[in-house]
Image (cartoon, grey):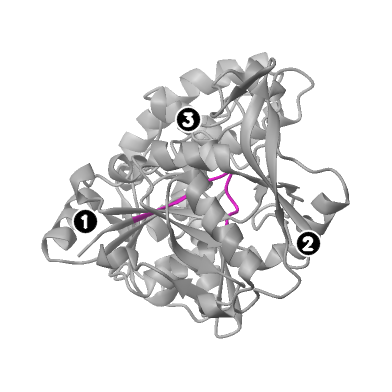
Amino acid sequence: MANVVVVGSQWGDEGKGKIVDWLSERADVVVRFQGGHNAGHTLVIDGVSYKLSLLPSGVVRGKLSVIGNGVVLDPHAFVKEVEKLSGQGVTVTPENLRIAENASLILSLHRELDELRETSNTGTRIGTTKRGIGPAYEDKVGRRAIRVMDLADKDVLTARIERLLAHHNPLRRGLGQPEIAVETIHAELMEVADKVLPYVDLVWRLLDEKRRSGARILFEGAQGALLDNDHGTYPFVTSSNTTAGQAATGSGLGPGALSYVLGITKAYTTRVGEGPFPTELTDEVGEFLGTRGHEFGTVTGRKRRCGWFDAVLVRQTVRVSGINGIALTKLDVLDGLEEIKVCVGYKLDGKTIDYLPASQEAQAKVEPVYETLEGWSGTTRGARSWADLPAQAVKYVRYVEELIGAPVAMLSTSPDRLDTILVQDPFQD
């Protein structure tokens, strides 16, 4: 059986929640492999909305769900999310949810540092969710993080906190903030330790056993490939790798186990936060897309920036993530537009290029080169077969496939999970 990696092919918010839910019903195990509780998925099941930020989507379906070592985990946010889902009637126990023992923790001091940086009048404002994700990853890379396993031993935990504060207290003094006592962080963690530890497991071994037994594993990415710390619009990126290769590193399962990469791709483009956006529309069309598409963040509620589909960017992420097929979402948002533009290249300093340069300055200067297609007056909303789509909508989809160099494996025509046209089942690779 194929194991499937789901990644966003743009700047996130591509509609991964619905697609992951659709796939998780066919999977045996669902794994989160990067990010933290800054990632938002909304699942609608039998008319009930479930908003997930940290937990894998499969937990709502009762599937074995795993938080991998590549995730940074806020233990208080974890406990709150489990309690919220339990209040909605979802069973969440160590039987169906596991956490990698070597996942790094997000603490209150990380959230405070994130807030201080984002509200400062100096430095680059990234547009983070202020949830401590970036500072937690910094400590992980700096080899001073507190990890989930450390919660099991109070003496070890004290030593880990001392090591961490040897870095953070001088940093806080420099920012004009009071130092933090070891006892404060220790008490903060002991408050939730007993609620987190029952879920801890050797995830690398668990996943290997599941793979060997023939289980179908779904790897659920957060954010989008253009927010990748290496391959995205740096420095306006997240603090983890969001491309498909991270599924192996962030879970402990070797890359040979990754069979199919599905790129979730919105039929237009959106972005939250700061950074370059070549096809951004600040006119009435941009407002139309935002209003029709309900473009507000699941986690923050922030209004998303909207623009035309950028084939240059998606073609690049298709290659970087090794995307085998895409799930094209929100096609119905384009219904009723007389004409639709697609970015097919860029102009930079008078030259035409077919890629997004890595330089921050060059990214800010690129100008989109558009092809204009005829829109459609009919509706695509709720379509469940190609025959239900207006001819021009089919033409648009085929043109997107041609430009990005990847086929449409799934086509989503509304938030309803049943309004999906399946072309190729990723699990039957």
Residue 207's tag is 1
**Image coords of residue 290 (percent x, y):** 77, 56
What's drawn in magenta, residue-wise? Answer: 5-14
Q: Is residue 143 left or right of residue 350?
A: left
**Image coords of residue 348 (percent x, y):** 66, 20
Q: Main secondary structure of the magenta part?
A: loop
Residue 375's tag is none
Q: Earlier in the sequence, mark 3 or mark 2?
A: 3
Q: How many marks?
A: 3
Residue 231's tag is 3
**Image coords of residue 383 (percent x, y):** 58, 78
Residue 337's tag is 2
Give how far apart the Cα atoms at labels 2 and 1 are: 46 Å
Three-letter amino acid code of the residue under disc 2 = Leu
Three-letter amino acid code of the residue under disc 3 = His
Q: Is residue 282 left or right of residue 175?
A: right
Look at the picture and state if 203 lies above or below 178.
below
Q: Secondary structure at mark 1?
A: helix
Three-letter amino acid code of the residue under disc 1 = Leu
Give how far apart the Cα atoms at labels 3 and 2 are: 33 Å
